[in-house]
Amino acid sequence: MAKLRRLGRPTDHRKAMLRNLTTSLLHHGKIETTVTRAKETKRMAEKMITLGKKGDLHAKRQALAYLYDRDVVKLLFEEIAPNYAERNGGYTRILKLGPRRGDGSEMVILELV
């Protein structure tokens, strides 16, 4: 199994941040963040879309347990997941933007394909 990135945060803060980023990605379609955060968010977003493709009650409850917004879960199961019915993974893409002005951290756009 792949090792999880710690992102320089305590466990509860890191989990909450990833849940927020995943919820925002599914709600807005794309987000701007750092490379390492984007890679971790990509993993979770792809898992959520896979749950949406299953479409059963158990999958919906699992998505509700992870995502913060009920409306995003509804959007995931009714609009986002059916768009990827024929696709086996690779639902997101990372586009590099360059370094951030303040601290030079590498920035990216994480978007749904």
Image (cartoon, helix red, strand yellow):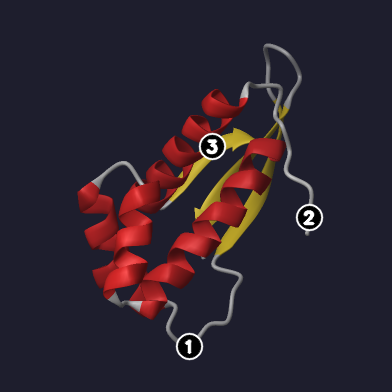
Proximity of marks 3 and 2: CB atoms separated by less than 8 Å: no
Residue 86 bears which disc, if any?
1
| Residue closest to the eye, 59 or 97 | 59
Mark nearer the N terminus (3 vs 1)? 3
Residue 4 lies, with reference to residue 34, above or below; the image says below
Q: What element carries label 3?
A: strand
Q: Name the residue under label 3.
A: 32
- Give residue 89's position: percent from left, percent from top: 59, 74
Q: Is residue 112 visible?
A: no
Q: Name the residue under label 2.
A: 2
Q: Can you name the residue that lies furthest to the top here?
A: 102
Name the amino acid type tagged 1: Glu
Disc 3 crowd rating (10 Å Cα; few below 14, some 14-19, many 20+) is: some
Alpha carbon of mark 3 to alpha carbon of mark 2: how far?
24 Å
Q: Could you tell me which residue is drawn at 70 percent across and 39 percent down?
A: 35
Name the amino acid type tagged 3: Glu
Splitting the image into 4 quarters, where does residue 1 fall? bottom right
Q: Could you tell me which residue is drawn at 64 percent across and 45 percent down?
A: 40
Name the amino acid type tagged 2: Ala
Splitting the image into 4 quarters, where does residue 80 fall? bottom left
Q: For marks 2 and 1, give the one nearer the viewer.
A: 2
Q: Could you tell me which residue is drawn at 53 percent across and 35 percent down?
A: 15
Q: Can residue 89 be seen in this view?
A: yes
- Give residue 86's position: percent from left, percent from top: 48, 88
Q: What element carries label 1?
A: loop
